[in-house]
Image (spheres, helix red, strand yellow):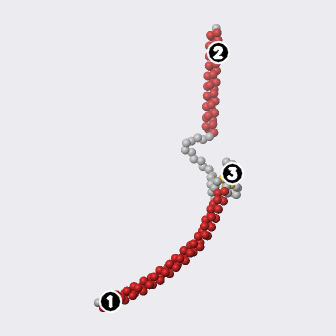
């Protein structure tokens, strides 16, 4: 009788475990398919939406963000704040380059004056060379007549 009672308990537990497992699978399947109907799923979908690109006039590192995802924004709203450190460094570099250029101006002016004087010297040498050529041509013509 003990064996029969134990068998009945095991069969009852197995039967109710099977029923519970079957009910769990059915509930899970129903939830899975209902959620599947709630959201579209595809491998090659494209979304049609109104997109508004944000054009940045300057670049740099962002120090603070003033918006959250999907928040509506209006024209003139501040969205992000860009760090000024990088711009300070660029300003200092540009100022240094400007001072360097100002320092080079007298040197370039002196070079220009030197080149102008060199041109005058070359023109004088050219005039001398033309005079020598003229003299040599006259001597050539004279020797040619003598010959």
Which residue appears at 62% of the width and 10% of the height? 3
Residue bearing the label numbered 1 = 143
**Would you say the residues marked 2 and 1 are in contact, meaning their CB atoms lie under 8 Å apart?**
no
Q: Secondary structure at mark 3?
A: strand
Q: Position of residue 97 (x, y in %)?
A: 61, 65
Which residue appears at 64% of the width and 9% of the height? 2
Quadrant including the C terminus: bottom left
Residue bearing the label numbered 2 = 9
Q: Above or below — where is 144 with respect to 109?
A: below
Q: Position of residue 126 (x, y in %)?
A: 45, 82
Q: Residues within 10 Å of mark 3 (few under 14, many from 20)?
A: few
Q: Residues within 10 Å of mark 1 (few under 14, many from 20)?
A: few
Q: Secondary structure at mark 1?
A: helix
Q: Secondary structure at mark 2?
A: helix
**Of the pair 20 and 77, the residue shown nearer to us:** 77
Mark positioned earlier in the residue sequence (2 or 3): 2
């Amino acid at each position: 009788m003990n064996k029969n009672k134990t068998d009945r308990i095991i069969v009852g537990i197995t039967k109710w475990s099977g029923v519970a497992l079957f009910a769990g699978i059915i509930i899970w399947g129903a939830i899975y398919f209902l959620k599947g109907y709630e959201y579209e799923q595809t491998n090659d979908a494209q979304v049609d939406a109104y997109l508004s690109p944000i054009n940045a006039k300057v670049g740099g590192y962002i120090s603070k963000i003033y918006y959250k995802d999907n928040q509506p924004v209006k024209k003139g709203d501040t969205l992000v704040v860009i760090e000024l450190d990088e711009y300070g460094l660029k300003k200092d570099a540009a100022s240094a380059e400007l001072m360097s250029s100002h320092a080079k101006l007298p040197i370039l002016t002196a070079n220009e004056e030197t080149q102008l004087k060199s041109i005058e010297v070359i023109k004088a040498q050219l005039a001398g060379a033309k005079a020598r050529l003229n003299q040599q041509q006259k001597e050539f013509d004279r020797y040619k007549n003598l010959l």
